[in-house]
């Protein structure tokens, strides 16, 4: 099994889980981070769940793609937001606005961002012919 397939499958499983949690358990999801849940946070979490679903579908549907320019772009399109989420989570943790459970999210986001980054940079020089 290729590294891309492993990383994509893990991403699809993770984002499917996040989709379900944000859509159906938004209050618990927000509370687990040490934030106060409200109507606004519930609405935002449910809306964000649709992005989680989109990433889950993209990762699952692309996991069998051969190396190509499209696959490289998919890797970048997933790695950049994951790295951004890890940075934002770290910032909020340092500010004290979230609790230590954010460390789990930061760890997972960083690991996946690095994994996708490795796929992009290892294949960077590989020629892609249309």
Image: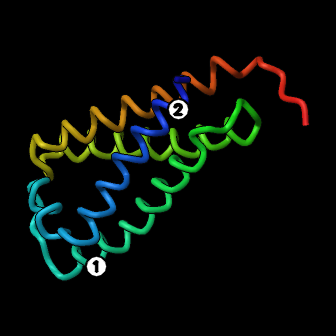
Mark 1 or 2, closer to the camera: 2
Q: Residue at x 60, y 45 (%)?
A: 62
Work out whether residue 67 or residue 102 is closer to the camera in this orientation and state it: 67
Q: Residue at x 47, y 26 (%)?
A: 115
Question: Which residue bears the numbered disc 2?
Answer: 5
Residues marked 1 and 2 touching at CB (< 8 Å): no
Q: Residue at x 34, y 40 (%)?
A: 86
- Disc 1 crowd rating (10 Å Cα; few below 14, some 14-19, many 20+) is some
Work out whether residue 69 or residue 101 is closer to the camera in this orientation and state it: 69
Distance, label 1 to label 2, CA atoms, is: 33 Å
Q: Is residue 46 positioned above or below 55 on the image?
A: below
Secondary structure of the residue carrying tag 1 is helix
- Disc 2 crowd rating (10 Å Cα; few below 14, some 14-19, many 20+) is some
Question: Which residue bears the numbered disc 1?
Answer: 43
Residue 102 location (% of width, % of height): 18, 43
Please indicate whether residue 61 sits to the left or right of residue 93 in the image: right
Give the quadrant of the C terminus. top right
Q: Is residue 47 positioned above or below 107 on the image?
A: below
Mark carried by residue 90: none
Q: Residue at x 20, y 69 (%)?
A: 26
């Amino acid at each position: 099994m290729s590294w891309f397939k492993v990383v994509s499958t893990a991403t699809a499983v993770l984002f499917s889980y996040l989709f379900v949690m944000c859509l159906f358990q938004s209050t618990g999801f927000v509370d687990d981070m040490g934030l106060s849940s409200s109507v606004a946070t519930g609405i935002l979490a449910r809306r964000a769940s649709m992005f989680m679903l989109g990433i889950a579908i993209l990762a699952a549907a692309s996991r069998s793609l051969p190396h190509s320019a499209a696959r490289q772009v998919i890797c970048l399109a997933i790695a950049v937001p994951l790295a951004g989420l890890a940075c934002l989570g770290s910032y909020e943790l340092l500010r004290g606005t979230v609790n230590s459970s954010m460390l789990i999210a930061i760890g997972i986001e960083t690991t996946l961002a690095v994994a996708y980054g490795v796929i992009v940079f290892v294949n960077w020089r590989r020629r892609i012919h249309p």
